[in-house]
Image: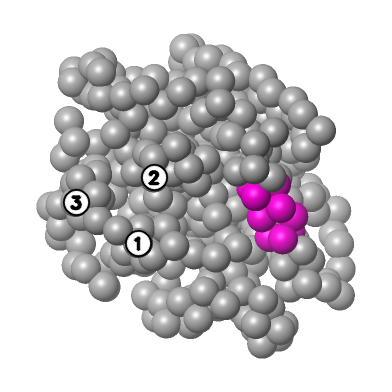
Amino acid sequence: MTLRDVGFFLRGRVNRGVSRALNRGRPVLPLRPAPLEEALRAEASPLARVPLLEARTNAEREAAVARYLEMRGVPFTRHRFGSFEGQGENFVVDVGAGDRVLVLVAHHDAVPGSPGANDNAAGVAILLHLLERVARRPPSRLRVRFLFPACEELGYLGTRAYVRDVPPAGVIGVLSLELCGIGDSLALWDAPEESGFLTQVRTAFRGIRLRPDEDYHFVGRIPVFGSDHRAFAALGVPAYGLTVVPRGEAEGLRRFVFSPVRSALIHLVRRPVPFDTYHTNRDAVGTLQDSALDLTLRGLEAVIAEIS
C-alpha cells in the first residue's frame, strides 16, 4: 500500500464519519427493492433503470449490474480485487475504436442502510442507458470506456485497484457520475485548473446551449467529499466529478461542500439539496427527477460527440 492509498483510505473513513454525524438520530428502515426480473427489463429511460440497484445490498447491486450486461449480450470485462480494506468486482465496457480513451465512471455500491438511489443508482442507470445508445453508432476514433466500480464508499477502493492493475494508457479524460438525479444544473468539480479535456467539455456543454454559471458550473477541488475520478487524477489524468444540482441551491451547496465539518453542525436540521438525502434512508427513487438524469445524459452525449 502506498502513502497515496493510505490517504484515500483515511479520506473514505472521514467521509463516512461526516455522514454518520449528519444522520445521527435518524431511524434505520428496512430496504425493500423492486423485483429484480422486473428491474432488469426496464427500457424506457435512465430513471426506469434506477430500481435495478435501489434498496439492494452491495453484493446484490454488484450482481445486478453483471446480470444486466449479460442479459443484453453486452461484452464486458470483470475485474476482481480484494485487500484488508474490502473486496468487490468492477465491470468495464468498451465501445468504439482508436487509441484515445474517454472513461465514464459510475460506482455501483452504496452506504449500508441507504437505498442508494441518487448515490449512485442514478449514475449507473445513466451509463447503462448511454452505452446502449453509443453502441448503436460507435465512434471510429474514440473508445468510450464505461467503468462500474465497487467500493467507492471505501475511499474509491475499486477504482484504485483498477488503475493499479490497468494503467490508464491513452486515457484523455475521466468523468465520474455522483448524485446525478436531482436538480437542473450540471456541476463539474475538482477542476481547479484548465486542461484540454476541460475545454472540450465546456465546448460540448455550450454546443447544446447550456449557459455557464446557470446551466452548468465548473468548481475547484472539494475537500473530504470525492469520487472515483480521484484515483485517475492521482496519476496525472484529467479527471473530474460530474453532479447535478438545483441552481437555486448553488450558493448553499458551495458553502456546504467547502466546509463539510462546519456544515455538518449547521445543517443538522436542514441540508441543501441533494445532500438532504445523501447517505440516508430517504435516498429513494421517488426523490429523483427524470429531467436531471436526462440532462446528464445530454451532457455526456455532447462530450462524446465533441471529442469524437
Q: Is residue 109 visible?
A: no
Report the magenta residues as a range.
7-16
**Point 60% across, 43% down: residue:** 4
Q: Amino acid at mark 2?
A: Ala
Type of the residue with mark 3: Thr
Picture quarter with the C terminus = top left
Q: Horizontal placement of 216 versus 168: left or right?
A: left
Which corner quadrant holds the N terminus?
A: top right
- Tell me the element at label 1: loop
- Can residue 14 be seen here? The reply is yes
In terms of sequence position, does the residue under pointer 1 or pointer 3 come before the other?
1
Disc on the earlier residue, 1 or 2: 1
Front residue of 30/179: it is 179
Pointer 1 and pointer 2: residues touching (CB < 8 Å)? no
Q: Which disc is residue 239 wearing?
A: 2
Numbered badge on residue 199: 3
